[in-house]
Amino acid sequence: MLKPYNLLENVLIDIERNIRENLNSNILANKYSLSDGHLRRLFKFAFKQNIAGYIRARKLSASLYELFNTDLNIIDIALSYGYSYEQTYIRAFKDEFGSAPGELRKTGQIVKVKPPLYLFDENKLEESVLFGPDIVMVPKFHIAGKSHIIPYDESVTLAPKAAIHFWENDRKHINNVKNPNVYIGLTCNNNYDAMNSEYITSVIVSDLENIPQGYRCFTFDGCLCARFRYIGQHHYYDINSRIASGMYNRIWKYASSKHEKYILMDDKVRFEKIDTDSYDGSYCQMEWFTPVTERNE
């Protein structure tokens, strides 16, 4: 099985090489021994758009060359890009560009096209891939879980172990869980403790009522956050110190840049989010969030 970076890179290359074929996510998934549903989820997680919509937009964008630079009939252009019927091509074209191909050919109007997606070296980790940051608004939410005081220099080793223990043992005692498949690992840094941080292994709850004794409650106030998206060729339980260090080193590199518009406020609070339901035995997905503030010029 290909590593995540190589898989996604190959999928993008296949789309461009077969832009004139009747290509779809199922064909691509079969080629790489994935389920169609998993490839669609993985593509959307990585690139924040549906693979079917991306393939359609790339086909239509590529077809503009023949439309503007040849005298081919619309039906011939449609057939050359895998459309069996002229009207199907025309409807898709109008949805994408706002005008029918014949109208656009007459007016010569400038249109915005969907450019090809690319992966870059900065996305590539040793055996995984990291995207971001996206700047997103995270709504207010409540968590309940177990609190762990962890030394900073041991967090990449101890936090994953604490997460597994919570997921296998402690979470089943919490009743008002909003999504039982989602894990939240939240880190709070205390100004008065320069050596340790609090790591809360938790789930999102609908409210903070009737939380079992001995469990830690925390409310994350809605705010603007930076979100990084991680894809690894391993199970969630296999997130170890080496994997965590590689991801965090890349995030800290972004955080230390003085050319970015936003400053990461990770010295206060940050959290990782894992939807365990998205794993089907091939690639795991994880999101990492921290509040941000605009950099003063």
Image (spheres, grey):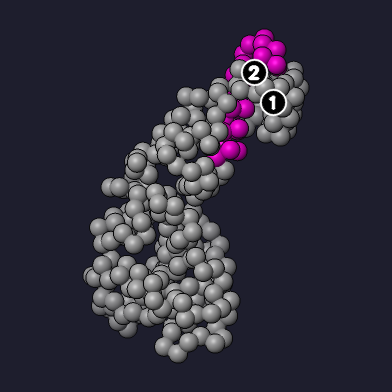
What residue appears at the point 62 percent right and 13 percent down from the top-left corner?
Answer: 69
Residue 47 highlighted magenta (yes or no): no
Q: Is residue 29 left or right of residue 97?
A: left
* Category of crowding for the residue at label 2, using alpha-carbon neighbours closer than 10 angstroms: few (below 14), some (14–19), many (at least 20): some
Nearer to us in this view, 88 or 58: 88
Residue at label 2?
79
Which label was assigned to residue 49? none
Residue 261 visible, this angle: no
Query: What secondary structure is marked by label 1?
Result: helix
What residue appears at the point 51 percent right and 48 percent down from the top-left corner?
Answer: 41
Q: Amino acid at mark 2?
A: Leu
> Can you give x and y, in whole percent of width and height, for residue 191 in the image?
34, 80
Q: Quadrant of residue 156?
A: bottom left
Q: Main secondary structure of the magenta part?
A: helix
Q: Amino acid at mark 1?
A: Tyr
Which label was assigned to residue 89? 1
What residue appears at the point 57 percent right and 68 percent down from the top-left corner?
Answer: 139
Query: What secondary structure is marked by label 2?
Result: helix
Residue 272, compared with residue 27, is above or below; it is below
Residue 291, compared with residue 196, is above or below; it is above
